[in-house]
Image (cartoon, rainbow, N blue to C red):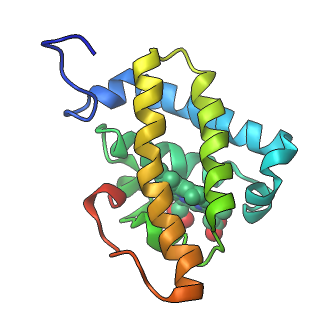
Amino acid sequence: MEEGMKKFGDGDTSYLAAGKQTGIRRLVDRFYDIMATDRRFRIIREMHAQDDTVSRDKLALFLCGWLGGPHMYRQKYGQIIIPAVHAHLDIGDSERDQWLSCMREAIEAQPYKREFKDYLCEQLTFPASAIRARSGAEKKTGPSFPVGSTTNTQ
Ligand code: HEM
């Protein structure tokens, strides 16, 4: 990002870089389309309902707020704590890595600048790892992540 410009993460800079709600819906649709068709991601696809319409809507609206835009998930579905809504799922390293790889491919397909693609991929590793810590690890070793981190709630 050029000197003097706002950094990603400041205000709604990331939301705008992602193309607002339209661009974020395009990203999420690509993510779920790849997940549905590429066998490498079949384990995480099988975790979702056959009809993924609501999952697409929820992830897109969540990302709008998470990227600094309007809190549309909260307005439509209520408060959310990301690790908690995944706690019933068995998410270990491989499921987390599948999710991140699938998302990386979807991000690569978007008309975003290189630096925003890299930034977004990196930022998503934080909630993904928090989910993995809360989901898979909790079942084996007990709770290991404080629910309610500001980066994972809306
Ligand atoms: C770590 C790998 C991940 C896996 C395997 C995964 C899997 C899933 C699945 C299977 C659902 C549907 C749950 C259900 O219908 O009961 C879901 C919902 C959701 N996921 Fe993830 N997810 C992951 C990471 C993430 C990340 C990093 C985010 C946010 C940046 C996210 C945001 C959401 C949201 C907003 C919902 C909808 C929750 C609700 O309102 O019920 N997920 N996820």
Vertical relation: 66 (above or below) 90? above
Residue at horizontal 32 percent and vertical 47 percent from the top:
71
Vertical relation: 106 (above or below) 150? above
Question: What x and y, as percent, mark residue 81?
Answer: 39, 67
Residue at horizontal 40 percent and vertical 65 percent from the top:
80
Work out whether residue 108 or residue 49 is closer to the camera in this orientation and state it. Answer: 108
- Please indicate whether residue 130 sits to the left or right of residue 97 in the image: left
**Quadrant field for ligand 1:** bottom right
Work out whether residue 69 can be spotted: yes
Residue at horizontal 58 percent and vertical 86 percent from the top:
139
- Please indicate whether residue 84 sits to the left or right of residue 13 in the image: right
Work out whether residue 87 can be spotted: no
Task: Give the quadrant of the C terminus.
Answer: bottom left
Task: Give the quadrant of the N terminus.
Answer: top left
Work out whether residue 76 or residue 122 is closer to the camera in this orientation and state it. Answer: 122
- Please indicate whether residue 76 sits to the left or right of residue 41 in the image: left
Residue at horizontal 82 percent and vertical 46 percent from the top:
40
Question: What x and y, as percent, mark residue 75?
Answer: 36, 54
Question: What x and y, as percent, mark residue 30?
Answer: 67, 32
- Residue extending furthest toward the left: 4
Question: What x and y, as percent, mark residue 27?
Answer: 58, 31
Vertical relation: 154 (above or below) 87? above
Vertical relation: 89 (above or below) 142? above
